[in-house]
Every structure is written in structure tokens, then in C-alpha cells.
Image (spheres, helix red, strand yellow):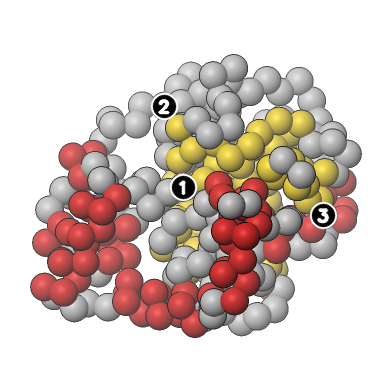
Amino acid sequence: MSDRLVVLPQYLIPKQALTLLAGRVARAQAGVLTTRLIAWFVRRYRVNMSEAANPDVASYATFNDFFTRALRPGVRPMADAELICPVDGAISQLGRIEGQQIFQAKGHQYSSTALLGGDAALASQFDDGHFATIYLSPRDYHRIHMPCDGRLLRMTYVPGDLFSVNPVTARGVPGLFARNERVVCVFEGASGPFVLVLVGATVVGSMATVWHGPINNPRVGKLCGWRYEDKSINLNQGEEMGRFLLGSTVVMLFPKGPLTFNSAWQPGGPVRLGEMMA
């Protein structure tokens, strides 16, 4: 069966309603029911709780508390590299941006302008630059960290669809990452501007950043922007910058220049927070 046929039901199901329901369940403090849900999730997705700062599933008041759990100190050492991997996950795609075209999957590309919510001026800074897309599965650690030192310039919430972002959907839905709900975070680093785009998905209750908190709860259905040039918000390499309340995907954009990705990084391969990215 083709990937497009596999994802066809996603066009038909009430994704917004399912996501709202999932968000309510994830925020609920339901005692033993919450503990049972977390225990089932750990078994179903083989979550490695030995890496968690708090491995006791019964101690989490909500599913969100469990899902955004911290790691034990030292389990993700930081590589000595200009760019480190900002998350645990699997590589969806990476490489050069061809003009403004970003490779999604065989037969699918999308533009950097579309990804960045129609901001052509911002997108032009990454013409012929570099990108990396990393998918976070349900079992992964879901906090997002800085790939390098950066000063926050602005943030934009872009409303959109809520398709799943798993590999099958990436192959079957054209322009997936530029049509789903997303949060665009723009930074200035030592080598110029860079962008982290947090892409939402079905049942992703919300996305949050350390400087703002939850961004899309409630969903306002319109593009919103925040400027931080005068706020002096500086984040160090490896420092937490945000989190997903249920999992999704991070897309990173870097400007044109002599950037070389880790030769071991290949589409579909697993990656971990802190390893050398480029």
C-alpha cells in the first residue's frame, strides 16, 4: 500500500478535537488512573526510565509531567563540537537547502518561506544554507536544547494542520512540516542567524519555551509574533530552550557557509542529545 493511501485517514479524522482531548487527559491529575496510563505508555513504547532523573512512574502528578521528565545528570554528555544535536530522536532528513527548497522525502519538498510562516525576508537568510530535521518518537526524551550558544531575536507561532509527523506521514503528506502548526524561534549565533522550528502534530497538546511557557494553549488560530531583540535572552549550548507536551519534530536552519554535518548522520538513523551534529 502506498504511503499516500496509508495517511489518507488523517485527512478525515477530527485532528483538532483529538488533540484537544489528548491535551486535557495529559494535564489531568487523576491519581491512580494517571499512574496506570503512564505505566502502560512506558511498557507500550519501551521508555527507558533508568535515564530519568525520577524513575518512579507513580510520582508524576500528570502525564505531561512524565512526558517532559528530566534526565539524570551525565546521561547525555555534550560533545566538543560547534553544533551538537539538540534532542533525542531519529534523523528525518538533512543536507543543503537548494535555493529555498528543503527536502522532506522522496518526491516532496517545501520552501523555507512557507516553513517560516511566509516571512520571505527571514527565509532569504538561509538561501542555499543547511537544514536538519529530527523526529521525536513517543519513547524519546522530549526537551529541546540549544545546538550552540545563541541570543534569542524573535519567536513566531504559525497555526496549521495537525498531521502526524512520523516517517510514513512525511513520505505521504506534501509539505508536511510547512503546513502543520509550528513555533519558529530565531537566534543569533557566533556564525550568524539560525532557526529552530518546533513542529506540532496530532495529539501534541502544546509546545513551550523556557522564556515564554506554553505557546499554543489555547490555540488562537492566527499567526502571532514576539520580539526579543531588546531583552538580552542568551542561551548556552546544551541549555534547555523548550519542550513538546507530546512528541513531534524539530527543523533547524543554518545559513550558507562551510558547515559539515557529522558523517555518521544518515536519514532514519537514531541520534541523541549532545552528540556532534556538525
Q: Residue at x 82, y 54 (%)?
A: 113
Between disc 3 and disc 2, whose residue precedes? Answer: 2
Q: Quadrant of residue 156?
A: bottom right
Kind of residue at badge 1: Leu
Kind of residue at badge 2: Met
Front residue of 37/186: it is 37
Q: Nearer the viewer, mark 1 or mark 3?
A: 1
The answer to the question of whether label 1 and label 3 lie on touching residues, with beta carbons closer than 8 A, is no
Residue assigned mark 1 = 136
272 in relation to 136, above or below: above
Q: Quadrant of residue 36?
A: bottom left
Of the 4 image quadrants, the one containing the C terminus is top right
Q: Residue at x 46, y 47 (%)?
A: 136
- Cα distance in 3D space between marks 1 and 3: 24 Å
Q: Secondary structure at mark 3?
A: helix
228 in relation to 129, above or below: below
User: Which mark is on residue 235?
Assistant: none
Q: Secondary structure at mark 1?
A: loop
Between disc 1 and disc 3, whose residue precedes? Answer: 3
Q: Residue at x 79, y 58 (%)?
A: 114
Front residue of 11/131: it is 11
Q: Is residue 188 visible?
A: no
Residue assigned mark 3 = 113
Residue 197, image x and y in percent?
63, 52
